[in-house]
Image (cartoon, rainbow, N blue to C red):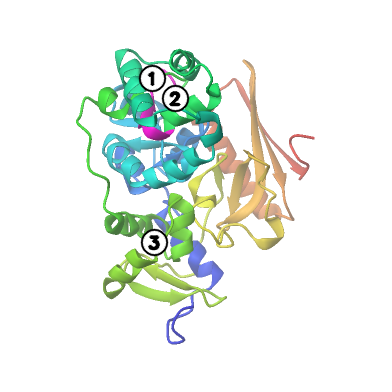
Amino acid sequence: MASANAPVLSTRALNRATMERQLLLRRTAVPVKDAVSRLVGLQAQNTRPPYFQLFSRLEGFDPAALSALMESREVVRIVTLRSTIHTHTAEDALTLRPLVQPARDRELNMFRSGLAGVDLDRLATLARKLVEERPRTMKELREELRLHWPDADPQSLGVAARCRLPLVQVTPRGLWGRSGQVALTTAEHWLDRPPQPAASPDATVLRYLGAFGPASVKDLQMWAGLTRMREVFERLRPGLATFRDESGVELFDLPDAPRPDPETPAPPRFLPEFDNVLLGHADRTRVIPPAYKGRNGVGNQAYGTVLADGFLAAVWRLDKTADEAVVTVQALGDLGSETRDAITREALAMLEVMAPAPAHDIRFATFVDFGD
């Protein structure tokens, strides 16, 4: 618990601070690569979300700009935070991946029964040779490894390779308007750089606070998939500002980081599934009202979300044909006419860039699970 003398930040104050750090209060004119770095990566379980994340944050965003960075190998798709695929700058891919290796080791432990008799060091050496010879699909990699361990579980062999090696998804996978199966090689090979030391935990905490703060120790641990980070915060405490949330939980922040007035306007924003602003904290009430908890997805499937006044207000889906692009917005509560109009304008602006078609249509409906 925080000191009783620490200032209390309301949920709205936390929301506005987070929206500002996440470039969601106003679109910002910064280069795409700088934005990817500033946000400490973009969650990218699917291929399109990073593009939609940047559209909602950057002024004049062109999807081709992110594709160009991927083709020039300045950004890559790699498993890092929370054991999920992120789009990172090359620099972050090389340094964040070793930082979160303890989480990959814990994940691997869950597959030990399928790896009985497997020498994991030898497996890593063989897998590295295979994927650096040429990019391999996971199926190809499993089949090659089974030649050496025919009695092992094939799925576990693939997991072991993914956990022990920093595997990146090579292009054309992830390029805008292109398709391609997942083919893997090591980050060092793809980027033509030597292995790098792990990012400093202290520097990573400071970067996290810059993008997601004010935040608690648990928030950071949830975002990174790391444990035992309290000692890092304690080491940094003399240089940090401290607050409490309305429940008394201690929050840390960079002293000079922006904390806007809670009444600062926050325009509607369309976010794709798995946007980090919805996943970057253990306590997500700063963006997701308690009444809407769990409404932005079912199981491991997340919906696109609409923020209104900075908070989750609706989910959305895009359907596109050769003749028409349609956004269906399912409101989680009463939006009001002014908010609906603002959401419509934002949706149309999004379609102009992200789904050009002869006709565009915005439809509103009451929330019903898109899977129903």
Amino acid identity at mark 3: Met
Left or right of 268, for residue 298: right
Q: Which element type, helix, strand or loop, lies under badge 2?
A: loop
Amino acid identity at mark 1: Thr
Q: Which residue is mark 2?
A: 174
Q: Quadrant of residue 37?
A: top left
Going by the picture, which residue comes out furthest to the bottom? 5
Q: Is residue 320 magenta?
A: no
Going by the picture, which residue comes out furthest to the left? 194
Q: Is residue 165 magenta?
A: yes
User: Which residue sits at x=44%, y=17%?
Assistant: 141
User: Which residue sits at x=39%, y=28%?
Assistant: 119
98 or 156: nearer the eye?
156
**Distance from the alpha carbon under mark 1 to that under mark 2:** 7 Å
Q: Which element type, helix, strand or loop, lies under badge 1?
A: loop
Quick check: can you spot residue 264?
no
Q: Which residue is mark 3?
A: 229
Placement of 54 over or under 243, stated as above or below: above
Q: Earlier in the sequence, mark 3 or mark 2?
A: 2
In percent of width and height, residue 263 lies at 52, 68
Q: Which residue is mark 1?
A: 171
Placement of 131 over or under 163, stated as above or below: above
The quarter of the rendered structure image containing the C terminus is: top right
Give the magenta range. 163-174
Of badges 3 and 2, the one in the foreground is 3
